Amino acid sequence: MQYRFESGLSIHEIKKLYGAVNWSHYLQSIDETARGIANSTLLTARTDDGELVGLIRGVSDMHTILFIQDLIVLPEYQHQGIGHELLAQFDDYFKQVARIVVACDDPQMQAFFADADYLPESDTATNTFIRPRRLLEPRY
């Protein structure tokens, strides 16, 4: 398995990877997803022949905070240590960052991050707030 930082993914790779784990909200506007990925820090896991089998991506100021947005491994490659390796390499790359934040509602992913010594929000005395997407309105 090859792990490498990349600047983006093809539309076909996005469809295959995000579709395989049923993250359909990313597939509603694939061009927007591709732009978001291109503006993130992206670490991929690829087979020796170059097939994309997993990724982790985040957004950071490189000093005080990193938000991990996605950690995905194709179902047929799960439970082989790929997700743990992606997270470990990401943690190492961002070792100078004071706080790493992950938001997820999937119980399996919550268990995954807990196993990696990430603390649930209830243990950190913080709250998460999300602003829903707003359409841009012209201001005159």
Image (cartoon, rainbow, N blue to C red):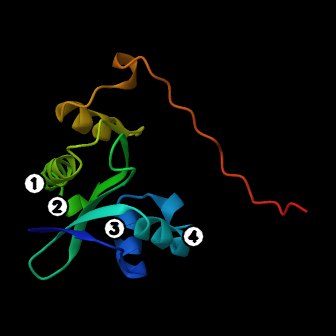
Quadrant for residue 110, please give it: top left
- Indicate the position of residue 57 as horizontal and vertical percent values: 33, 57
| Relative to 35, residue 69 above or below | above
Q: Earlier in the sequence, mark 4 or mark 1?
A: 4
- Indicate the position of residue 92 as horizontal and vertical percent values: 16, 48
Task: Tell me whether circle 4 and circle 1 mark residues in contact (CB < 8 Å).
Answer: no
**Residue that label 1 marks:** 80
Task: Tell me whether circle 3 and circle 4 mark residues in contact (CB < 8 Å).
Answer: no
**Quarter of the image where the N terminus is located:** bottom left
**Residue shown at 42%/17% (left/top)?**
125
Task: Tell me whether circle 2 and circle 4 mark residues in contact (CB < 8 Å).
Answer: no
**Residue that label 2 marks:** 77
Q: Residues within 10 Å of mark 4 (few under 14, many from 20)?
A: few
**Quarter of the image where the C terminus is located:** bottom right
Alpha carbon of mark 3 to alpha carbon of mark 2: how far?
A: 11 Å
Task: Tell me whether circle 1 and circle 2 mark residues in contact (CB < 8 Å).
Answer: yes
**Residue that label 4 marks:** 29
Q: Residues within 10 Å of mark 3 (few under 14, many from 20)?
A: some
